[in-house]
């Protein structure tokens, strides 16, 4: 019998196109001596192998409960959520009972919290307001869900330009676009890609302006890099703690494993809105009905016995030093004399470079190809914009390469910049 | 300033209603002396605490690579996928190169593979053909995605009734419903809930009939319980290995952790269709860009050194014995004399009970309340149907309770049945 297969995809399936980052990865595979300043991996040298091994040894010692190898719950381990709530309260400058464990859901990295949030809030065609620049995996996810990202305007210093936003919001009211704005997404601390943190007055001003435009919509603050402040400070209060945001349904998305061991992949969301949180949990019930219990049990232990914080104490100076190494190598390579500029971030994993305004560092450019040819990879900044990209930007990470490789990668990058 | 929050949910968010199973859990929490024959957890006593501890100790020994604590890839560890492909080939009776590691994706439990499959294939309003009865978490997921489940008809013996299906397919052709059928979902081995495995002639016949109706649509075989055959046999070939299915795009969904340690939550999908698999991977890139690398590294190790299979050798007789204990206790309790019947499964975790035809064991019945009152919980079979439920069915698991508790739970259940 001859049969032909009936092969069709859903609207979502049809939008599921290869991630742009895959092209970067392919380039890396084709050139084994390539040094990658692109991959947002963490530092191998400071991964907590010993701490992790000890935690598992204690959890599996004779007489220990086997429950960490059993299914957990959809929402996540109660004790872990309690520890997380107390930790969050301390970071926001409140006493431990300020945050509620019941408002937390544990997820497969913070990425799943972001995905669930968008799934339950937005239909195809809806608009999400995002930082400029913003996290490119989030932007790709929006495209995958059929959503439109619009940038919150910023000034030359990278700060939110609220006057410009006011004008845009007024214009969108006229065009009817305002009704399609369903959420706001902010990367509050040491942003991927810009390395910037939102200042408290920017956060306050944004809430006031959105409120004035009656745009009190669900707002997500992505705090993935908050623990990675070089000086260990918690930074500005999050949207959870600022009075101006109190009428907004808010989701604070964080991760326990970016600053500890990314291979464990445990993130969380703290959601102030019962209805929103419930719906995310119900969808999580369909996706996996609970994140791996073992990973949560390990994190619960290292949070509880202080070894998580001791690990943070070790990695902070290590990343600060690696940032300095990359920064100094770019200075030494003469990049500033060529008209490039960047700020030195106080945390996170990224340097955000601005080339002269007429430069184009995009994926399809001679500059990009020359870098691959010279054996260095970066993330073109153009990938990090919800709408009109700034083509003269690049994201360089100091997270993954060892110091000597950071210096060599910077040399190669500066060599290409000097010749272009 | 007085503001009101603009609070709306997407179509998907609006469909995200509380899972029915939550009502069972609530009942359990309200009665601490309740014995649960409902929860599909695995046996605590045989969890591989020592094996797991040893694997982690080896992976974190001085000098070991820290890479298991670093991010992995979106598709999953290459070596783990290679081991899985070879294993699958052996189970299907072929030589190790028969299956391709590139066709595998590693997921957060097999549940995520099922979710991704449905996301990229089906739009709201589409139809999925399912077993009768079928896995209730899958059925709830279909409702969450706005999809309609239709049962493949079965005879009194539980076998597929292909003549009845032929008539239905002809009728659906007339009504135009056929065009909405986008996928088929089969639980091939020791089904949750029925405990039945599909026989090879049922599988072949189904493929022939679907082909004759030009319904060569993507087909998922859920093999979550295949490793849990009491005698260790691999059972009938899956849809991957049967010639009649070769024109169908197929996804074989499995789990490594249901028979090992559910707390590690590592599942996988083997997908024969490049386009379908790619799109699932792209969506996974948006949901979590890769499952926890640590968990995969542990499974890779225990698969590679034989301790996974040694563990299977330990749990198979343990579950066989627990099945016998529950079965014997129900017989002793006189359930058969009351007109109830069930088969003794040869694997898996479930007994599937049929009460006399006029009985109603549903969630809102006197029988269910009497069971909760007597301190025993079960899953009403009515939850396990894509369309018209059989109200006189119940799923009892022998997986989680210890033997003495299984006996006591059975006593309570029979006591209620005798009085109703």
Image: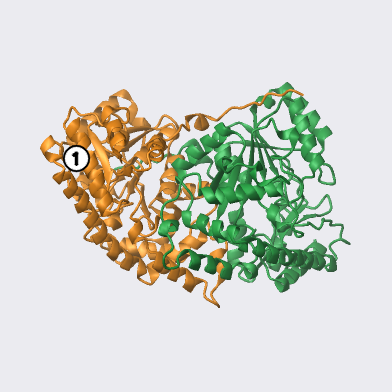
Chain colours: A green, B orange
Could you tell me which chain the residue with mark 1 belongs to?
B
B31 vs B386, nearest the viewer: B31
Examine the rendered structure and indicate whether residue B382 appears above or below residue A28. above
Residue positioned 47% across, 54% down in the render? A293
Residue positioned 81% across, 46% down in the render? A158
Q: Residue furthest right?
A: A337
Q: Where does residue B408 sit, x and y in percent of width and height?
A: 24, 46
Left or right, A44 with respect to B220, comes to: right
Q: Quadrant of the C terminus of chain B?
A: top left
Q: Where does residue B202 sit, x and y in percent of width and height?
A: 20, 45
B351 vs A26, nearest the viewer: B351
Q: Residue furthest left?
A: B337
Residue positioned 85% across, 65% down in the render? A334
Question: In this view of the protein, can residue B16 be seen by the observer?
Answer: yes
A336 vs B130, nearest the viewer: B130
Examine the rendered structure and indicate whether residue B386 appears above or below residue B1. below
Left or right, B23 with respect to A296, comes to: left
Q: Which residue is under mark 1?
A: B158
Crowd rating for badge 1 (residues with CA inside 10 Å; few <14, some 14–19, many 20+): some
Question: In this view of the protein, can residue A18 be seen by the observer?
Answer: no
Examine the rendered structure and indicate whether residue B176 appears above or below residue A252. above
Q: Secondary structure at mark 1?
A: loop
Name the quadrant containing residue A332.
bottom right
A82 vs A163, nearest the viewer: A82
Examine the rendered structure and indicate whether residue A213 appears above or below residue A302. above
Q: Residue furthest bottom?
A: B63
Residue positioned 54% across, 34% down in the render? A120
Name the quadrant containing residue A228.
bottom right
Q: Residue furthest front?
A: B33
Q: Where does residue A137 sit, x and y in percent of width and height?
A: 62, 48
């Amino acid at each position: 019998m001859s049969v032909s297969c009936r092969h069709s995809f859903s609207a979502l399936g049809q939008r599921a196109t290869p991630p742009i980052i895959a092209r970067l990865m392919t380039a890396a595979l084709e050139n084994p001596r390539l040094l990658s300043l692109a991959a947002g991996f963490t530092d191998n040298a400071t991964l907590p192998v010993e701490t992790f091994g000890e935690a598992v040894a204690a959890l599996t010692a004779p007489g220990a409960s086997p429950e960490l190898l059993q299914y957990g719950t959809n929402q996540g381990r109660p004790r872990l959520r309690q520890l997380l709530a107390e930790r969050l309260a301390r970071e926001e400058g409140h006493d431990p009972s300020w945050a509620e464990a019941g408002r937390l859901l544990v997820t497969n990295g913070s990425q799943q919290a972001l995905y669930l949030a968008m799934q339950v809030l937005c239909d195809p065609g809806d608009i999400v307001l995002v930082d400029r620049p913003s996290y490119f995996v989030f932007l790709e996810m929006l495209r995958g869900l059929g959503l439109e990202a619009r940038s919150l305007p910023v000034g030359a210093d990278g700060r939110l330009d609220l006057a410009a936003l006011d004008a845009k919001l007024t214009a969108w009211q006229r065009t009817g676009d305002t009704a399609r704005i369903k959420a706001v997404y902010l990367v509050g601390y040491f942003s991927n890609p810009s390395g910037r943190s939102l200042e408290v007055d920017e956060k306050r001003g944004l809430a006031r302006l959105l409120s004035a435009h009656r745009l009190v919509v669900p707002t997500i603050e992505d705090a993935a890099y908050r623990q990675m402040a070089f000086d260990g400070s918690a930074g500005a209060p999050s949207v959870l703690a600022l009075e101006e945001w109190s009428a907004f349904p808010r989701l604070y998305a964080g991760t326990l494993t970016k600053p500890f061991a990314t291979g464990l992949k445990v993130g969380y969301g703290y959601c102030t809105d019962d209805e929103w949180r419930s719906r995310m949990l119900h969808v999580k019930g369909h996706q996996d009905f609970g994140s791996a219990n073992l990973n949560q049990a390990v994190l619960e232990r290292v949070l509880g016995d202080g070894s998580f914080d001791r690990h943070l104490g070790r990695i902070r100076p290590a990343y600060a030093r690696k940032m300095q190494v990359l920064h100094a190598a770019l200075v030494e390579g003469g990049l500033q004399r060529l008209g490039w500029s960047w700020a030195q971030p106080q945390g996170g994993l990224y340097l955000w470079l601005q080339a002269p305004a007429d430069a184009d560092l995009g994926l399809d450019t001679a500059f990009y190809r020359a870098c691959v040819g010279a054996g260095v990879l970066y993330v073109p900044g153009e990938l990090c914009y919800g709408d009109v990209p700034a083509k003269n930007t690049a994201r360089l990470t100091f997270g993954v390469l060892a110091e000597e490789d950071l210096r060599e990668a910077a040399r190669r990058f500066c060599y290409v910049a000097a010749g272009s």
